[in-house]
Amino acid sequence: MSDETSIWLRPVDRKGFMSVGALAALAAASGGRLGADALAAIDAADASGTLYYYNWAAYVNPKTYTAFRKKTGVNVKKDFYASNEVLQAKLQAGGRGYDLVVPTGYMVQILAQGKLLQPINWSKLPTASKNLDAKFKGLPYDPKNKWSVAKDWGTTGFTYRTDKVKEKPTTWKQFFDLTMGKYSGKVSLLDGSPEVIGSVAIMLGYSYSTGNKKELDAVRKFLLKLKKHIHSIDSVNTKAKLIKGTTVMAQQWNGDGAVVASKKPALYVIPKEGAEYWIDAYCIPKGAKNVDAAHAWIDFVYSPKINALETEYTYYGSPLKRNLLKGVLAKAIYNDPAVFPPQRTLANLEPNRVTAQATRMRERIWTEFKSA
């Protein structure tokens, strides 16, 4: 097995738009122009050795690893996590040696506040600086673009097998009613407290990020009644279970739902009550040994051709300027509303804005739910 596809240190145990201009400061620092060709040449020369990449499983097109190694000479070794909380725990416990990680937006803020990240050097990212859509700069979790670079974005909804579920659910209420009724034991949930608790909160008429004790008590009571009807709590094998028919419905991220729909009769749904809208981001953890390789990777994947490869593999929305994707991204994906939801759909979505205090309450509920 080659270096770029090997797995390194398998663990013992994957979101609102605002705008800030990062390019102005970068242009000023480079004498009024980016000097992209010169900077790219310097970065390619600096990057060497091995990039230790801690990431979600199946979140990079295998072709990208090969192309990156060919371009830079840098090998990639990988380790995977199943949730943002696992990533956080690993770094808080002193896990070192990782050069690149991909937390979700809310977790970027938590890791930065915990002094677990090191700043992004934008002078090493000429391609990313040029091609990143302005909507993905100055985001609420990183308003000064200090700690992160947007990787991709998407939604949290549910997928159902249309050949097995004839009810055509369009809401969280219908999804959970069917889970506790006709399809009991045939539905999976994501292994993440923000997604599960947030989605139930929306169904009950609350904010995805609610920290209200009375509202969370209602969420808790519902989850404890729901637990016996759940087939599995799983973020890793959810696609395979739906494709195989082990489950007939699953709470999923949109990219996973699109993959299932490409292989079996299935439909990914953004529930009418609302849902989570997330952004995942590249970050460099504190203690990274190969910072040059981490920056080289980020800049490399911001070329339209490589970014299209990524989107065609993950089915998650690209943060590149839209016009750069036309002609390089497969037309069916470019026009797929599950991958790039229309504005009218986005207007009904919420990012994760759970406070630290609310997180503590929600994690207690999550632990009780999983152990019930």
Image: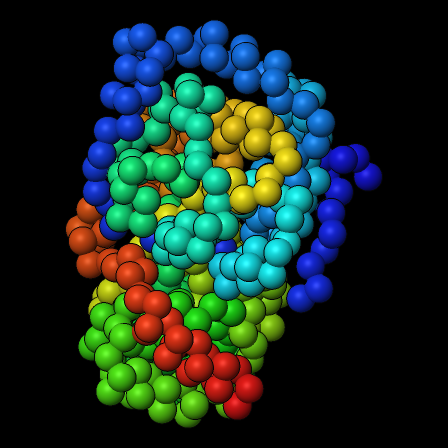
Query: How many discs mark residues in the rendered view?
Result: 0
Answer above or below: position of 53 versus 200. Answer: above
Measured from the top left, where is residue 86 in percent x and y?
A: 56, 62
> Is residue 106 visible from the viewing direction of this image?
yes
**In the picture provided, is 189 more to the left or to the right than 44?**
left
Measured from the top left, where is residue 132 in percent x and y?
A: 34, 29
Image quarter of residue 24: top left
Answer above or below: position of 271 versus 304. Answer: below
Answer above or below: position of 167 versus 328. Answer: below
Measured from the top left, where is residue 319 in percent x and y?
A: 36, 36
**In the picture provided, is 88 more to the left or to the right than 193?**
right
* Residue at 22% from the left image edge and 75% from the top image edge: 206
Image quarter of residue 42: top right
Colour option used: rainbow
Q: Quadrant of the N terminus?
A: top right
The residue closer to the viewer here, 257 or 279, is 279
Answer above or below: position of 352 versus 336. Answer: below
* Residue at 64% from the left image edge and 48% from the top image edge: 96
Query: Which residue ends up furthest to the right in the rendered image?
Result: 1
* Residue at 22% from the left image edge and 53% from the top image edge: 345
> Is residue 182 visible from the viewing direction of this image?
no
The residue closer to the viewer here, 333 or 101, is 101
Image quarter of residue 43: top right
Measured from the top left, where is residue 249 in percent x and y?
A: 47, 71
The residue closer to the viewer here, 276 or 119, is 119
**In the picture provided, is 27 more to the left or to the right than 229?**
left
* Residue at 64% from the left image edge and 36% from the top image edge: 289
